[in-house]
Image (tube, rainbow, N blue to C red):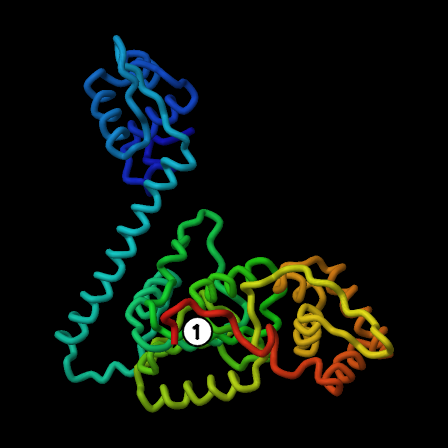
Amino acid sequence: MDVSSGGPWAGTGLAPLSGRVLEYLVGHPAADSPTVAAAVGASADEIGRALRTLEDELLVIRIDGRPPRWEAGPPRSSLGSLLARRRSELAQTELYMEQLHGIYRAVSRPDAPHLVEVLEHGEEVSARYAYLLKGSRHEVLHLAKPPYVTEPADGSAHRHPAEFAVHEGVRLRSVYDTEGFTDEVSLETALRGTAGGGEFRLSSRLPVKLVLFDRTTALLPLHGDRPSAGSLVVHSLALMDVFAALFESIWERAVPMSLESRQDWPVPRQVHGTAETDERTREILHLMATGMKDDAIARVLGVSRRTVQKHVSEAGSVLGARTRFQIALLAAERGWLDGGLASGEGPRRPAGRS
C-alpha cells in the first residue's frame, strides 16, 4: 500500500510513518519495537514516536513484557472512532467558517441587502445546509425530488447523520416526490430525513426542490436537473412568504406516510361477501394511487415486490377490479383510502416534539 505522500492516511491526521507502522501491526500482531523498526525501515526513535501516537489515538495497545510488544486494535472500530472525531472537528470548522463569512460580509459591504447568495460548489452547499439546519429553532420545511446529490466514490463528501439532525422541538415536515423512490439512495435520503421524528408525506410532480429554515432562509438548486451544480440561498422575506405558501399548498394535498413501522402484514380477505382490509393493504393502495410502481412501494414499506403484488391482486379480487386504475378508483369509493396512511397519522413523534 503506497503511503509515501499520506495516501489513505491523509484524512486521518496520521503521519505516513504511523500509517506504515499500523499496517504492519495489523498483519503481525504482538510485534516488539525493533521488529517493527526493521520491517518499516525507520529508526528506533521514529518508531517509538509513531507507536506513542498510535497508542494515544487508541489504534494500538501495549502488551507488557520484556521487551514490550504492540498489537493493533480492530481497524473497523478503532479507525472508525478516529474518523468520527475528525468529521466532528471538520464540522465545527465549517460552522466557524460560516460565522467568519458573516462577519466578512457585514464589514466588506454593510449596506448590501444580500437577499440572494449563490453557492457554486457542492461542498459549500452541504456545509451551508448543515449550518442552517443546526441554526433552525422552530420549523424546517422540505420539498424533495430527484435527482439527489449522491456521495462521491471516494467518500469525501460523507457526513455523519448527526450533522443533519434538527434540535429538539423543531418541527420538520417533508414532502417527497413519488418518483424519488426508485432506488436505494432515494429511500435512504427519506429515511435519514425522517429519522429524527419528522413528518413525512408523498406527492407526485413536485415543482421544485426546496428547504425553508424558520421561514427566514431558503435553499434551492440553481439547476433543478443538476443539484450538484450549485444552489441559491434566499433571505428575502417576501419570497419566504411565497415559498411557505407553496409548501403548505403541496402539504395539504400530499399523502401522509410513515416509515417507522414497516412490517409485512396479512393480505385482505373476503369475509361474508364484504371486504376486510388491513392497514398494510391500505398503505399499498395509497401509494399505488399516487402513481408509484410496485418496486418503489416495496422499498418504501420494506417488503418484497411479490408481497406488494399479492396485496394488490387480493384487493382487486375483493373489489372485482382488473386494472390498477380500477382498483384505486373502487378502493377510494369504498373509503379504503380515507384518513391517509398509518391510520391517518404521519410518523410517531418523540416526546417534546410539536
Q: For this rendering, which residue is in front, 210 or 280?
A: 280
Q: Quadrant of residue 272?
A: bottom right
Q: Is residue 336 left or right of residue 59?
A: right
Q: Which residue is mark 1?
A: 221
Q: For this rendering, which residue is in front, 229 or 238?
A: 238
- Residue at screen point 77% across, 69% down: 268
As displayed, is residue 62 above or below residue 292?
A: above
What is the quadrant of the C terminus in the image? bottom left
As displayed, is residue 42 above or below residue 235?
A: above
Q: Quadrant of residue 165?
A: bottom left
Amino acid type for the residue under numbered disc 1: Pro
- Residue 269, given in percent of the width and then of the height, sits at 81, 69
As displayed, is residue 82 above or below residue 199?
A: above
- Residue 160, given in percent of the width and then of the height, sits at 39, 54
- Residue 102, given in percent of the width and then of the height, sits at 20, 71
**Residue at the left extreme?**
107
- Neighbours of disc 1 within 10 Å: few (<14), some (14-19), many (20+): many
Q: For this rendering, which residue is in front, 150 or 143?
A: 143
Q: Quadrant of residue 297?
A: bottom right
**Residue at the front extreme?**
272
User: Callout 1: helix, strand or loop?
Assistant: strand
What is the quadrant of the N terminus in the image? top left
- Residue 290, given in percent of the width and then of the height, sits at 66, 78
- Residue at screen point 73% across, 64% down: 308
**How many labels, in total?**
1
Q: For this rendering, which residue is in front, 312 or 59?
A: 312
Q: Is residue 132 left or right of residue 146?
A: left
**Residue at the top extreme?**
66
Q: Is residue 301 left or right of residue 74?
A: right
